[in-house]
Image (cartoon, helix red, strand yellow):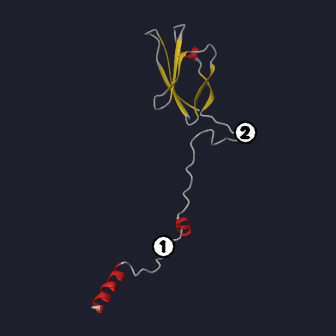
């Protein structure tokens, strides 16, 4: 009987894990195994200061000369349309009195096209390309 009692006690003790000290991870070990995540960079302009001497430019000034008097227009008012090769209009309006005028275009544009026309049907419509 004692033998049965001892055997049942041993089986209970084994089932409980032996009752000895268990090795649980120390809190310092768990913290040291966690890697620090990098902080995400901010897209806010206030967080990314530019130097005082920084310059931002998307457009440049361009001078262009077109002698309208030599093109044979009879109308007093002649119009000009300047556009990029992918048909983005940069200027559309009345031709200035002087043959030289200034307009602005994106920095990445190196060639423009222009149309010169008037409201008279007898006047020509001229389309040309201008290398900058």
User: Residue 113: horizontal and vertical position, in percent?
Assistant: 51, 27
Name the quarter where the C terminus is drawn: top right
Quadrant of residue 51 in the image?
A: top right
Task: State whether residue 113 is above or below residue 7.
Answer: above
The residue beneath circle 1 is 24
Residue 121 drawn above or below residue 2:
above
* Residue at the (32%, 89%) spot, across then down: 6
125 vs 68, left or right, is left
Task: Please indicate whether residue 78 sits to the left or right of residue 100 in the image.
Answer: left
On the rendered image, what quadrant is the N terminus found in? bottom left
C-beta proximity under 8 Å, tags 1 and 2: no
Q: Secondary structure at mark 2?
A: loop
Q: Position of residue 42 (x, y in %)?
A: 57, 45
Give the number of marks.
2
The spot of residue 30 in percent (x, y) is 52, 67
Choose top left, top right, bottom left or bottom right for residue 110.
top right
Nearer-the-camera pick, 106 or 68: 106
* Residue 16 sits above or below residue 33 on the image: below
Give the number of the disc on residue 53: 2
Report the front residue among 107 and 66: 107
> Which residue is drawn at the image coordinates 48% and 76% (left, top)?
23
User: Tag 1, which secondary structure?
Assistant: loop
**Residue at the location (54% across, 63% down)?**
35
Residue 123 lies left or right of residue 48; in this view the side is left
What residue is at 59 percent from the left and 34 percent from the top? 58
């Amino acid at each position: 009987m004692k033998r049965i009692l001892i055997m049942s006690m041993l089986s209970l003790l084994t089932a409980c894990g032996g009752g000895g000290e268990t090795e649980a991870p120390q809190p310092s070990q768990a913290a040291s195994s966690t890697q620090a995540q990098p902080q995400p960079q901010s897209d806010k302009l206030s967080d990314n200061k530019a130097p005082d001497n920084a310059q931002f430019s998307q457009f440049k000034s361009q001078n262009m000369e077109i002698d309208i008097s030599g093109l044979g227009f009879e109308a007093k008012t002649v119009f000009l349309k300047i556009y990029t090769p992918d048909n983005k209009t940069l200027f559309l309006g009345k031709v200035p009195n002087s043959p030289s005028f200034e307009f602005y275009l994106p920095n990445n544009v190196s060639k423009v096209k222009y149309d010169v026309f008037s409201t008279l049907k007898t006047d020509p419509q001229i389309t040309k390309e201008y290398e900058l």
